Image: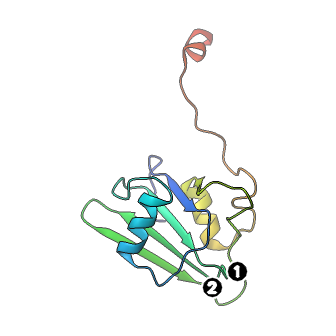
Amino acid sequence: MIGSTGRVRAFACASPVDMRKGFDGLFALVRRELCRDPLSGDLFLFVNKTRKRAKVLLWDGTGLCLYAKRLEKGSFACLWREGAGPGLDLTVTELQLFLEGASVVGRIALSPAPFLLTTENRRSG
């Protein structure tokens, strides 16, 4: 799987994207729509209107990588909802499930929230 470390995060654009966009067009969408740094090493997912095609943009430290998938049957889960923000945070596992065709991605949380060490956690330990 792409970006298999726990430190890598995944973000999905919550609106349909023109799949004719390449490196530069998707790079601009990450900055403009998702308000993220495309050179962070995180994964950025884009899906077209018919949900038959998806692309993932990734900076691997030496250059941009663009992964593409086209479904022959069925469609990807719908990531955009009425009134939703510009982006959707996913775990790498959720991204993998999405690319494999899971229909629940984006509808319900599939992974627990990240554990953050707070002063209260330290006192109870």
Q: Secondary structure at mark 1?
A: loop
Q: Position of residue 40 (x, y in %)?
A: 36, 52
Report the residue marked by disc 2. 71
Q: Position of residue 19 (x, y in %)?
A: 51, 81
Q: Please, what is the three-letter code of the amino acid marked with disc 1?
A: Ser
Report the residue marked by disc 1. 75
Q: Residues within 10 Å of mark 1 (few under 14, many from 20)?
A: some
Q: Residues within 10 Å of mark 2 (few under 14, many from 20)?
A: some
Q: Position of residue 83 (x, y in %)?
A: 72, 56
Q: Which residue is drawn at the image coordinates 70% and 80% (left, top)? A: 75
Q: Do the residues under discs 1 and 2 have CB atoms within 8 angstroms?
A: yes
Q: Position of residue 87 (x, y in %)?
A: 58, 56
Nearer the observer, 43 or 25: 25
Q: Which residue is drawn at the image coordinates 74% and 68% (left, top)? A: 103
Q: Is residue 112 above or below residue 22?
A: above
Q: Is residue 67 above or below residue 96?
A: below
Q: Which residue is drawn at the image coordinates 41% and 58% (left, top)? A: 31
Quadrant in which the C terminus is drawn: top right
Q: Which residue is drawn at the image coordinates 48% and 62% (left, top)? A: 44
In 3D space, how far apart are the residues under numbered discs 1 and 2 (Cα atoms)?
7 Å
- The answer to whether residue 3 of the structure is visible from this angle is no
